[in-house]
Image (tube, rainbow, N blue to C red):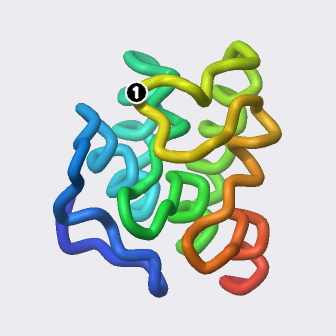
Amino acid sequence: MSPDVHTKGLDLPTSCFHHTKGGRRLLTASAAGLVEEFTKLLDSTPELVTYASFWKRNTCLHHAAATRNLSVLEAAAAVIQRLPKAAGTGIFNRCTASSPDGIVNQINWQGESPLMVACKSG
């Protein structure tokens, strides 16, 4: 997994004030389409799906949408559906989402949801 993977304006975090174990790996896996790595990380820590980069607030959904990684999006959606309602309020969360809908609709620093990023990416 290359740390230099970048997706159309959605820079992966190179440094974060509060690095969550596995957060950067999850974002990199989602951007690179590494479905096995992505699902392995979420199997061990499902709440990690709420992780967003520190400055740009991009989630794994933003990265997967930008790179058209449908398999990653499907894996993330399956995990999100199984999360308890308050899953977005833990240490893994850089977003304010407190429900599955909030995680799916999380807005990044440009005001874009993952769906908007997917539309822009074709």
Q: Position of residue 89 (x, y in %)?
A: 57, 26
Which residue lies at the image location 56% right of the left edge and 48% below the top edge?
A: 72
The C terminus sits in image quarter: bottom right
Which residue lies at the image location 55% right of the left edge and 72% below the top edge?
A: 109
Q: Position of residue 57 (x, y in %)?
A: 49, 61
Q: Position of residue 76 (x, y in %)?
A: 61, 39
| SS state under label 1 | loop
Choose between 51 and 98: the one closer to the eye: 98
Which residue lies at the image location 67% right of the left edge and 62% below the top edge?
A: 107
Q: How many marks do you count on the picture?
A: 1
Q: Position of residue 46 (x, y in %)?
A: 50, 22
Q: Is residue 80 left or right of residue 30?
A: right
Tell me the amino acid under the disc marked 1: Ile
Residue indicated by mark 1: 91
Residue 38's quadrant in the figure?
Answer: top left
Choose between 6 and 34: the one closer to the eye: 6
Q: Is residue 121 left or right of residue 56?
A: right
Q: Is residue 70 above or below residue 121?
A: above
